[in-house]
């Protein structure tokens, strides 16, 4: 029985091929972990950090970077709306109400927004809530209901400077909802009802006054011109049929038949 000779060359080639395959796989895995691609769109910008330090701000494009030494923080620059949750506030005249704010905002300085505070939205909430409490505490409830838009403008003016310090740009602030306690709602509904009833009574009084004024003018006109009454009566008779007209004449106004004959002769 012959023993085939051991082919060292063939074995070494197989081992080398396996080694090269493993080496390529490890190198590919390492490069994939070490280098990463990111895409920044037109409505975004990026903050580039190298070795933990801010390097520069980058604009829209495709970037490859070393993940072990470099980090890119993407920031959305589009306008966005935030609703400030309702909170109980005491007005100047001692009424407790709940107010919800709606604000439109955008990031003006991405570097300041990310590095000046841990969460710029929480900072925005705090600034607007403090401004709201300050203004409402100096405003009476009736003024608040009549000038909601103006109060939103006051909140905007009061908080704009503090918001800018966090790299944000405040666009609009509006009062979204005002909620009253149950008892106060009933009181306000009664006030509104009484006001509407008063307006209705005032309109009725104005109508009656105008009617009386017209009647007084008519009476004065008839007193000065008695003939107008007769003309009006004849006009009414002419407009309607089936009327009976009675003339009341005194005896002095009746002419005897003889005198009538004589007059004709």
Image (tube, rainbow, N blue to C red):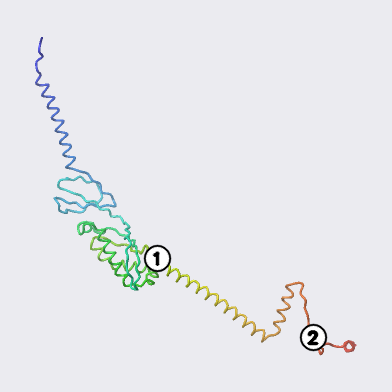
Q: Is residue 222 left or right of residue 124?
A: right
Labelled pair 1, 2 in contact (Cβ < 8 Å): no
Give me the residue at 58% from left, 77% from top: 208
Give me the residue at 31% from left, 71% from top: 137
Q: Quadrant of the C terminus?
A: bottom right
Residue 157, percent across and down? 30, 68
**Residue 49 in the image: above or below residue 168:** above
Residue 182, percent across and down? 40, 65
Residue extending furthest top?
1
Residue 49, percent across and down? 17, 51
**Residue 141 in the image: above or below residue 252:** above
Q: Under tag 2, what secondary structure?
A: loop
Q: Under tag 1, what secondary structure?
A: helix
The numbered mark at residue 182 is 1
**Residue 134 in the image: above or below residue 9:** below
Give me the residue at 10% from left, 10% from top: 2
Give me the residue at 79% from left, 85% from top: 249
Q: How many marks?
A: 2
Residue extending furthest front?
183
Q: Nearer the viewer, residue 42 or 140?
A: 140
Q: Nearer the viewer, residue 179 or 50?
A: 179
The numbered mark at residue 193 is none
Q: Which residue is mark 2?
A: 249
Q: Quadrant of the N terminus?
A: top left
Q: Quadrant of residue 78?
A: bottom left
For the residues labelled 1 and 2, the Cα–Cα distance comes to 76 Å
Residue 121, percent across and down? 26, 58
Mark 1 Cα within 10 Å, few/some/many (few <14, many 20+)?
Answer: few
Q: Earlier in the sequence, mark 1 or mark 2?
A: 1
Nearer the observer: mark 1 or 2; the answer is 1
Mark 2 Cα within 10 Å, few/some/many (few <14, many 20+)?
Answer: few
């Amino acid at each position: 029985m012959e023993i085939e000779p051991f082919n060292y060359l063939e074995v070494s080639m197989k081992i080398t091929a396996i080694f090269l395959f493993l080496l390529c796989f490890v190198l590919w895995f390492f490069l994939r972990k070490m280098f990463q691609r990111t895409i920044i769109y037109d409505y975004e910008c990026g903050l580039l950090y190298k070795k933990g330090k801010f390097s520069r701000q980058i604009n829209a494009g495709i970037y490859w970077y070393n993940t072990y030494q470099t980090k890119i923080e993407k920031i959305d620059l589009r306008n966005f709306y935030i609703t400030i949750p309702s909170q109980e506030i005491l007005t100047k005249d001692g009424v407790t109400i709940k107010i919800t704010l709606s604000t439109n905002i955008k990031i003006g300085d991405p570097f300041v927004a990310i590095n000046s505070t841990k969460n710029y939205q929480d900072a925005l909430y705090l600034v607007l809530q403090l401004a709201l409490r300050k203004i409402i505490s100096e405003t009476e409830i009736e003024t608040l209901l009549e000038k909601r838009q103006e109060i939103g403008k006051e909140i905007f003016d009061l908080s704009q400077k503090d918001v800018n310090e966090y790299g944000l740009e405040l666009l609009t602030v509006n009062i979204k909802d005002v909620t009253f306690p149950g008892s106060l709602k009933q009181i306000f509904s009664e006030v509104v009802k009484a006001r509407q009833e008063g307006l209705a009574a005032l309109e009725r009084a104005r109508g009656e006054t105008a009617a009386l004024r017209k009647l007084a003018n008519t009476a004065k006109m008839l007193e000065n011109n008695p003939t107008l009454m007769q003309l009006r009566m004849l006009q009414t008779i002419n407009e309607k049929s089936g009327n009976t007209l009675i003339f009341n004449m005194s005896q002095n106004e009746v002419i005897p038949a003889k005198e009538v004959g004589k007059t004709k002769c």
